[in-house]
C-alpha cells in the first residue's frame, strides 16, 4: 500500500495512492486519524487498507503532495553511512553512526520546488532512503527492529554546503527552509520483505550522479533503529534518513551544485521516484525589529 500526504483547496489530508488516483483517508477516518502520523499511532494500517478498492477522490497528477509525514516528532538523519561517501568526504571510520536532526520546515513534498536560499549558491543533492517508524519503542534490539518499521520512502537531504561547514556541527547547512525533499509516498513494509536489497539512484537533469544498494550501508537499518532508540524513544511517524552514497556534488571536480531550473530525482527500487525542481528563494522585505549580525 502506498500512502501520501497532500494539501488541497479543502485543506490538508492524506490517502492511499492507487493506479486510479488517491483515496482520501482523512475524510473516511475522521478525527481519530486526521493525518498519516495519527494513523500510524493508532495502529490503523489494516483498517485503512480496506478502503483501497474504493473509487478515488482525486487525481494524483492534480494533487499537491506534502512531505510524507508533515509533522514528525523527530527526523533523525545519518551521515557517512556508505563507504564510498566516507572515503570521498575524507572522514575516519567510526564505531557508531554519525547523526544529525532535521526540522519539519526544512522539507518539501514530491513535485514541490526545493529552494536555493538567498545566502548561498552551494545547494547539493543527497539521495537517501527514509524509514518511517510505525511502532513506538525504546532500546529496540536489532533482532526486533523490522517490527517497528511502518514503511519506506525516498529522501533528498538537500544540503547548503558552505553553511554546513561553518562549524563541526552540520545543523545549519541541513535545515534551511524547504531544502529537503521527502516523498512521493510511503510504501508500507508489508510490500518490501525485511532486509530486501533496495537500489538507490540520484539523477540531476537526467544524469546519474549516485547509485548504490542497501547492501553497501556501513550501518544497516536494524543497527540504526537499535542505536537511535537507545537514547530516544522512537514514535510512530518518526523518520530515520539512512545516509547518502558517494557522488555528491561538492566532492566532484569541478563541484556540481544545484541551481534554479534544475530537476533532481531520487529513485528507490520498489518504492518510487521523488522529483523536485530547484527554485530561487524569493527575497523578503526587511522587517522592523530584525536582529542584526554581531
Image (cartoon, grey):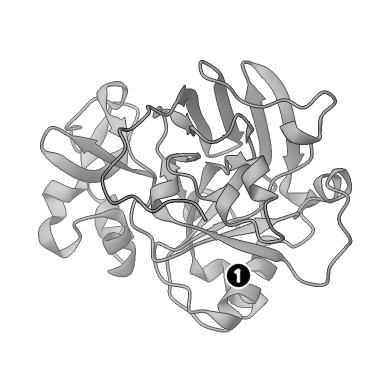
**Residue of label 1:** 225
Of the 4 image quadrants, the one containing the N terminus is top left
Vertical position of residue 166 compared to residue 118: above or below: below
**Label 1 crowd (10 A; few <14 / some 14-19 / many >=20):** many
Q: In this view, does 26 lie to the left or right of 203?
A: left
State whether residue 140 appears in this view: no
Vertical position of residue 29 compared to residue 73: above or below: above
User: Number of callouts in the render?
Assistant: 1
Name the residue located 54 percent from the left edge and 43 percent from the top edge. Answer: 155
Which one is nearer the viewer's eye here, 110 or 262? Answer: 262
Name the residue located 30 percent from the left edge and 27 percent from the top edge. Answer: 60
Name the residue located 20 percent from the left edge and 32 percent from the top edge. Answer: 56
Vertical position of residue 119 compared to residue 3: above or below: above
Q: Is residue 115 left or right of residue 209?
A: left
Please tell me whether mark 1 sits on a helix, a strand or a loop: helix
State whether residue 277 appears in this view: yes
Where residue 119 sits in the image (x, y, percent)?
A: 53, 36
Vertical position of residue 173 compared to residue 255: above or below: below
Q: In this view, does 133 lie to the left or right of 269?
A: left
Name the quadrant containing residue 46. Answer: bottom left
Where residue 133 sits in the image (x, y, percent)?
A: 47, 64
Where residue 44 sits in the image (x, y, percent)?
A: 28, 63
Which one is nearer the viewer's eye here, 214 or 232? Answer: 232
Where residue 260 sits in the image (x, y, percent)?
A: 52, 19
Amino acid at each position: 500500500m502506498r500512502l501520501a500526504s497532500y494539501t488541497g483547496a479543502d485543506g490538508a489530508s492524506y490517502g492511499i495512492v492507487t493506479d486510479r488516483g488517491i483515496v482520501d483517508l482523512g475524510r473516511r477516518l475522521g478525527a481519530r486519524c486526521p493525518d498519516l502520523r495519527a494513523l500510524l499511532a493508532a495502529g490503523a494500517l489494516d483498517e485503512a487498507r480496506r478502503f483501497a478498492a474504493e473509487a478515488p477522490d482525486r487525481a494524483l497528477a492534480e494533487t499537491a503532495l506534502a512531505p510524507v509525514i508533515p509533522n514528525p516528532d523527530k527526523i533523525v538523519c545519518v551521515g557517512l553511512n556508505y563507504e564510498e561517501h566516507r572515503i570521498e568526504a575524507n572522514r575516519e571510520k567510526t564505531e557508531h553512526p554519525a547523526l544529525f536532526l532535521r526540522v519539519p520546515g526544512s522539507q518539501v513534498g514530491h513535485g514541490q520546488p526545493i529552494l536555493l536560499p538567498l545566502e548561498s549558491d552551494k545547494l547539493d543533492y543527497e539521495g537517501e532512503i527514509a524509514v518511517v517508524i510505525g511502532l513506538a519503542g525504546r532500546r529496540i534490539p536489532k533482532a526486533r527492529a523490522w517490527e517497528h518499521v511502518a514503511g519506506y520512502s525516498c529522501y533528498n537531504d538537500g544540503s547548503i554546503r558552505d553553511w554546513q561547514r561553518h562549524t563541526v556541527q552540520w545543523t545549519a547547512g541541513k535545515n534551511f527552509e524547504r531544502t529537503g525533499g521527502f516523498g512521493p509516498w510511503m510504501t508500507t513494509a508489508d510490500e518490501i520483505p525485511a532486509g530486501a536489497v533496495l537500489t538507490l539512484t540520484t539523477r540531476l537533469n537526467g544524469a546519474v550522479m549516485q547509485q548504490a544498494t542497501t547492501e553497501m550501508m556501513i550501518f544497516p537499518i536494524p543497527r540504526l533503529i537499535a542505536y537511535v532508540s537507545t537514547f530516544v524513544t522512537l514514535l510512530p511517524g518518526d523518520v530515520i534518513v539512512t545516509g547518502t552514497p558517494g557522488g555528491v556534488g561538492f566532492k566532484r571536480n569541478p563541484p556540481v551544485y544545484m541551481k534554479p531550473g534544475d530537476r533532481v530525482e531520487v529513485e528507490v527500487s520498489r518504492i518510487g521516484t521523488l522529483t523536485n525542481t530547484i527554485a530561487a528563494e524569493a527575497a523578503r522585505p526587511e522587517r522592523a525589529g530584525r536582529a542584526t549580525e554581531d
